[in-house]
Amino acid sequence: MTTRKKARKKTTQKKSGRAAASRVKSARSGTARPSRARAEGAVRDLLAYIGEDVGREGLRETPARVVRAWDEAARGYLEDPVALLERTFTETEGYDEIILLTGIQFVSHCEHHMLPIIGQAHVGYLPARRIVGISKLARLVEIYAARLQVQEKMTAQIASSVNEILRPRGVGVVIEATHQCMSGRGIRKPGVVMTTSSMLGTFRTRPSTRAEFLSLIGRARRGRVVE
Ligand SMILES: [Zn+2]
């Protein structure tokens, strides 16, 4: 936030007293959450906006269904990646090679259009002291996928979570995905796969580690195609 905006906000709070101050606070901390009924009403408005008859039989349950679908698609906001990885690590007992999980399938939604991003993630790290069960890496991808995303941001979030919590010698994350907002609308380019990567620690500084990581991914996914 710019200094000017901050100053303006302060003045507004002073003028309209405590109620306004707490409204600003709750909006900023994300707790001013509308009710389910209001969310369903918003879906009904959207249906009416696109020219639908919201009263017709086939659409009667649609607002409730859409909101339930979004409960599922956005469940990642309720889960804490730190708690997931922190609870579960064990000591390495001397293992010091790359640990890699490839082809973690995910469905996310882009924050610009709320349309699906479908793809797979490859997550690898070179442990220092801590390792986690490999299923936890898949769960980590799932937590970040179940939020509104930008592929670059999701890639960096996964890498920095592993980096900060497990404190490995290095971590690498590669994500390959198709974006429905690209294939289904706008420039309409079906089949375009976007690849992003985030390399930290030795994966960034040591070309041999990075090369080993990338060749392990290549070997693991040979023959596999992102749809
Ligand atoms: Zn989009």
Image (cartoon, rainbow, N blue to C red):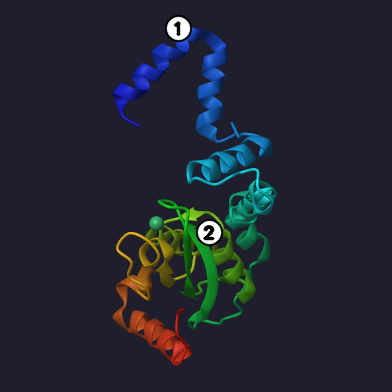
Residue at position x 36%, y 64% in the image: 182
Q: Give the mark count.
A: 2
| Mark 1 CB near ligand 1 (8 Å cut) | no
Q: How far apart are marks 1 and 2 (CA)?
A: 40 Å
Contact flag, marks 1 and 2 (Cβ < 8 Å) = no
Q: Looking at the image, is 159 positioned above or below residue 224?
A: above
Tell me the amino acid under the disc marked 1.
Lys
Please tell me which residue lies in front, 118 or 37. 37
Residue in the picture at 42% in, 13% down:
12
Look at the picture and state if 56 lies above or below 109: above
- In which quadrant of the rendered view does residue 58 lie? bottom right
Residue type indicated by callout 2? Tyr
Q: Is mark 1 on a helix, strand or loop?
A: helix
In this rendering, would 9 be left or right of 44? left
Q: Which of 29 and 70 is in front in this view?
A: 70
Q: Residue 77 carries which label?
A: none
Question: Is 147 above or below relative to 53?
Answer: below
> On the rendering, which quadrant does ligand 1 occupy?
bottom left
User: For the residue carrying disc 1, how many other residues have a C-alpha within 10 Å: few (<14), some (14-19), or many (20+)?
Assistant: few
| Residue 105 vertical position relative to residue 55 in the rendered view, above or below | below
Q: Which quarter of the picture shows residue 208?
A: bottom left
Relative to 215, is 80 on the left or the right? Answer: right
How far across and how far down the image is residue 226, in percent?
Answer: 45, 80
The answer to whether any part of residue 72 appears in the image is: yes
Q: Name the residue under label 1.
A: 15
Graded by Cα atoms within 10 Å as few (under 14), some (14 to 19) or many (20 or more), the crowding at tag 2 reads many
Give the mark, 1 or 2, whose residue is nearer the N terminus.
1
Position in image of residue 62 (x %, y %): 65, 51
Q: Position of residue 83 (x, y in %)?
A: 64, 55
Residue at the spot of label 2: 144
